Image (spheres, rainbow, N blue to C red):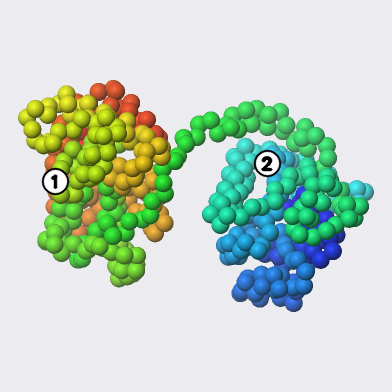
Amino acid sequence: MRTGSNLLEDYLNRIDGVTCHGEAFNQNFIGYPNRKDLLGITHRQREDNPDRLLRAIRTRDGLGGFRYFHDHDPRVLPAILSDARCAKIILTRNPLDSYISLKIAKATDQWKLTNVTTRKAAQAHFDLHEFERHVAGMQNFQLDIMRALQVTGQTAFHIGYDDLHDTEILSGLANWLGVSVDPDSLKSNLKPQNPQPLSEKVANFDQMQVALRGLDRFDLTRIPNFEPRRGPVVPSYVACPAHPVLYMPIRSGPEDRVIRWMAALDGAASDLLGKFNQKTLRAWMQENPGHQRFTVLRHPLARAHAAFCDKILDTGPGSFSRIRQQLGQFHGLELPDDPTDPGYGLKAHRAAFEGFLRFLKSNLNGQTSLRVDAHWASQVTCLQGMAEFCLPDHLYREEELADALPRLAQTMGIDAGPVPQGDRSQTDRLAQIHDAQLERLCREAYPRDYMMFGFSDFCTKNPA
């Protein structure tokens, strides 16, 4: 927002047929400070209809453009990014340099320098938390741009702050735009405002050095995520017709237990509302002001075991016979033809479940040809999918349900009975085979669930 982007704009405006109209969509002014209009469109008119100004820039003679920062009018960004005829020049700078420059600009209120005799001096005070927010905002904005360009198959011209005095790179930029330029014309009267080293620009430089040591520059603690994105799966949501309660299930969780409790509130399971689409669910939400939405987390090991028993081990309706066949043929799982066969004991069950956990790690990391099914997708990803439509008001853990659901009903003035017990056959069986090896394999398959939700090891003494 300071020398770098001003300098790039100045260079672009020196190219015949190219006009950069400043910060056309800055929320505080239009184009430049103290300007009342841009291309005949006033600040008020732009606020009412930003597309009007975008059209004016696009249809003006020559190649028109503007500078866009992460905090400018967000309404025009989708149109900019999706338009392949709009050339994207991405200017970047060392985030620490940009942070210090911004701090000094705010302190001096000097955003552009053409004469060094009028330069205002100030020192910045480094604040670690403020810097982290600054970096996060820049990174998120850059990632959004990168993804939009990847999705639409576009290529941007990337240029760094330190490249702005390289006439060969600037000439290359002009060629990329499809225009010609005389390199000798690429000279600007703008001056760097703070060319001195950081040690002279930062008042608490020593403290800054110590604080920056704690930053993970290479993101070493990041957990890679190759799991495909999921949608909100609105058709699976269940609501009470007589009470404003909506259950947003995560598959392989305690769905049967929760639904039986909701049915008890209204009298009969057949009366529960389901098979929503987004339109009908919005209508239900509008018709039920004060509604409460909730979902339930299950321990990753118990959830993986439930998915294994219900969808892979079982051969009845609703099971995944084709995936079962693939797991036996290519992933080494030894599964019985009849899961009720007395010859299939705990030892065989533990071995098969261990193989399933190993498969889950590969599957969730995108290393298998089989789909990542909702019944074993990570719970973090399921919640992110929900957020595309709406987030739950309450996030309960399975072991809390006996107290949490009646308390939820009480907050809405509903007399609720006790929460039914769930089928303990799967959890008892898991408790019998549980050991450190299964726990380790599950943590390897679901590292984000364990980290984000703080799950400890599966409790065999009192499993949910």
Q: Are marks 1 and 2 in contact (CB under 8 Å)?
A: no
Residue 103 percent across, percent down from the top left:
72, 45
Viewer can see residue 299: no
Q: Which image quadrant: the C terminus? A: top left
Viewer can see residue 368: yes
Discs 1/2, front: 1
Amino acid under disc 1: Gly
Q: Residue at x 72, y 62 (%)?
A: 66
Structural distance between the alpha carbons of marks 1 and 2? 57 Å
Q: Residue at x 58, y 32 (%)?
A: 218
Label 2 belongs to which residue?
Answer: 95
Residue 415 higher or lower than 362, as above or below: below
Which secondary structure, mark 2? helix
The label on residue 64 is none
Side (left or right) of 440 relative to 338:
right
Q: Nearer the viewer, residue 300 or 29?
A: 300
Q: Quadrant of residue 365?
A: top left
Residue 156 percent across, percent down from the top left:
66, 52
Q: Nearer the viewer, residue 331 or 459?
A: 331
Side (left or right) of 453 relative to 319:
right
Label 1 belongs to which residue?
Answer: 316
Q: Nearer the viewer, residue 183 or 125?
A: 183
Within 10 Å of disc 2 (Cα), the crowding (few <14, some 14-19, many 20+) is some
Within 10 Å of disc 1 (Cα), the crowding (few <14, some 14-19, many 20+) is few
Q: Quadrant of residue 457?
A: top left
Amino acid under disc 2: Pro
Point out the residue furthest to the front here: 329
Q: Residue at x 27, y 47 (%)?
A: 251
